[in-house]
Image (cartoon, rainbow, N blue to C red):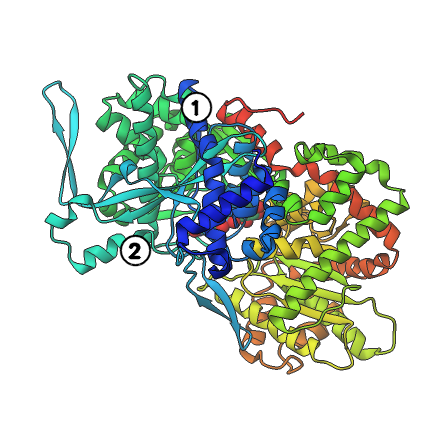
Amino acid sequence: MTVTCAQFKRDFLAEIKTLYATTLNDTSPLDQLIALGHLVRRYDGPNWAKTARAYQTQHRKQVYYFSIEFLPGRLLMANLLNLNLVTTVRHGLKELGLDLDQIRQAEPDPALGNGGLGRLAACYLDAMASLDIAGNGNGIRYRYGLFKQLFINGYQVEMPDDWLRNGNVWETRRENKSCIVRFGGHVWLQPQANGTLKPQYRDTDDVLAVPYDVGIVGYHNSVTNTLRLWSAELPPNADHTYYSQAQRDQIDDITKVLYPDDSNSAGQALRLRQEYFFTSAGVQSIVRHFCAHHHGMRTFAKQVAIHINDTHPTLVIPELMRLLMDEHHCSWDLAWALTRQVMSYTNHTILQEALETWPVALFQGLLPRIYQIVAEIDRRYRAQKTPVFGAALVDQTAPLGNGQVRMAYLAVIGSHSVNGVAPLHTELLKKDVLHGLYQVYPERFNNKTNGITLRRWVQLANPPLARTLDARIGNLWRRNPRLLKTLLAYQYDQGFLTELSQVKLANKQALAALVAQRLGLQIRTDAIYDVQVKRLHAYKRQLLHVFEILREYFQIKDQPTAPFVPRVHIFGAKAAPSYHYAKAIIKLINAVANLVNHDPVVGSRLKVVFIPNYGVSLAEVIIPAADVSEQISTASKEASGTSNMKLMANGALALATYDGANVDIIQAAGAKNEYPFGLTVAEVYRYYQRGDYRARDFYRGNPELKRIVDSLVDGTIPGISTEGREIYDSLLRYNDEFFVLADYASYVAQQRQISQDYQDQTAWQRRALANIAASGAFGADLAVARYADDIWQVPHDRLD
Ligand code: NBY
């Protein structure tokens, strides 16, 4: 995009005048943000239109990425970056007496997701547009995003996230693309004159699905794709029909709030309504669009790929079957063949409690026609597979079983591809969680290791690093992150290593300023910044990190004058509101912070910073400042992790178990450049098989550890009498489900090593460099290119 600075200034002032009928002096940063957003959209408008037209005229196969969560982060800077407008806009605003960095802060951060799964979806949209893939996102426009987190007296308090309060400058309401989604009522199959059966409906609750489209701008390539988010409203004939307040509320509720739980599958009718709502609307709009440009359905699978991001959108399978058969007169066999060719599914968890199932009664009552189709899929699956695989295996893997609809099984059976998100995770899917279906459909299983967009996580979040890299290796890495490998030539360049530590220092200063402003806490910038940012979960083991803090605390208290390498422990984490144990850990971290941060003996040497309301925008400040990346989940539990990749790309060294993509990170950067520790998956599974894990033995056998565990209940840490007891019991009474005590010794050994190693800054920065250099392998563009080649079968730009 080329706009001169002068042109930009004229356009911007005109925009202000049009929108607010006033002059610049009279506007707030929010006003300026909105005006700037309008202007960016105006600049990008021709690309958006051209992209859509080109896809049509070229009959490009479209990918539709269905996800119940998208965490795009603020879009102003991402759009300016991808349109190559950052410098022009920054200068132009400056000449008008404005500061781009102030304006960008006025943008709300759309928190339409819980964690890694939603952020991955956003990284992949950015990559699809940047690779010139005809890729669309399809999701829900939640009126309230993930709750805003406050700490009151150390406890998590959840407040509504009213992110749409001032509107959303990036969205376009497309009411003419609305469709009706049906719930409940009765359905029966009516024989037709031509011998077919057509479903008839009575007493259904109809909801209008209205799409809001957001442009997803590709990187320097004039491509703008679409993220379509659906909102639930009263149907258009509402004026003539009586709707009780309860009915109105029920419709309103569908897209009111994001379900704030990523710890287990939700047994909630509203959640199922949300899932059907956005899948039905999305599939209807895909089929409608296809039919507008093609005759008959036979080429559908050549033109469309639908991706199921975790099981929440699995109803795309029976919904497409329904449309093909009921509305487009396809036979079951044709509809089924098309559906399987079109669908692909990504699994994001091996945790049993996170695998979605719905009680048949609930499912059938809410979605009677969809249930008929699922029951027929189930019947045919059993009929075809029982002779080959036997009744036991088929029973165990069928879509219906134990009075439940099993969404993961339906997703595998109705797709041509199922992938895990790191090699280890994919192996565990085959061996464990989806073992039965792997026996039936081995050819469907494949791995696609996650990736992150370095555009946001390095170029935008860490401009000093990006500039330093440019100066050494040129700027082609911005297009092709694999070129970061060439950095290795500078491993022994003292000047460059010094620059890297200066970059880190600048980022630490920025984080320290944020901490001072938000928490009123001073943290020194010569300390090790030891960062753990992710959802709060027992399996992610923030508790183990707390144990290290307590160890350091006791060390200082025992030997106040002994040397101690200063540390700042930084946490960001939200707990699901109903996840009692996770909330107890939050209270513990805050209580330990309170104890440590105010101890005069400890002074500035050790600080604990728990920044509330962790999300994409905070991550953009914390991650560039990190020295140590805590990736300490119990081996086998973390499907992949993606903060591990973001931290790596920003030069943090990983303190990591052999879990998820940590394995691949350690391999890519070299074990000597990370701090691996802990039980392996094989060891964890051996404990499971033998049933011989005894947490108490670790407790009794290690006095240092015993002191720490005891401090949870002996009054050492004020204010945690109930939480301390609960956590203590989880370890000793309930035998430490996540092997915290077993991994303590090897974790702490690496932490000690870190303190020692950090003192040699040259050696440390050399290892940071190795991490940055190896991080290109985890770029989202590479990951998405693999999806495009192996799963979606769509063409894409090459990176080199
Ligand atoms: O997906 C995460 C995995 O834990 C992480 O290892 C992986 O890197 C990432 C991307 O592949 N999963 C995740 O974020 N899951 C959720 O957010 C989630 C949300 C809702 C529900 C379950 C999980 N739910 O049951 O409603």
- Mark 2 Cα shell of 10 Å, populated few (<14), some (14-19), many (≥20): some
Asked whether 104 or 724 is in front, the reply is 104
Residue that label 1 marks: 55
Q: Position of residue 350 (x, y in %)?
A: 53, 46
On the picture, is 365 further left or further right than 314? left
Could you tell me the amino acid type at mark 2?
Asp
Residue that label 2 marks: 253
The residue at 25%/26% (across/down) is 325
**Quadrant where the C terminus lies?**
top right
On the picture, is 209 further left or further right than 755? left
Label 2 sits on a secondary structure element that is helix
How far apart are the two marked residues, 1 and 2, measured between alpha carbons? 35 Å
- Mark 1 Cα shell of 10 Å, populated few (<14), some (14-19), many (≥20): some
Q: Is residue 337 above or below residue 776?
A: above
Q: Position of residue 195 (x, y in %)?
A: 13, 19
Which of discs 1 and 2 lies nearer the camera? The answer is: 1
**Quadrant where the N terminus lies?**
top right
Label 1 sits on a secondary structure element that is helix
Asked whether 586 or 775 is in front, the reply is 775
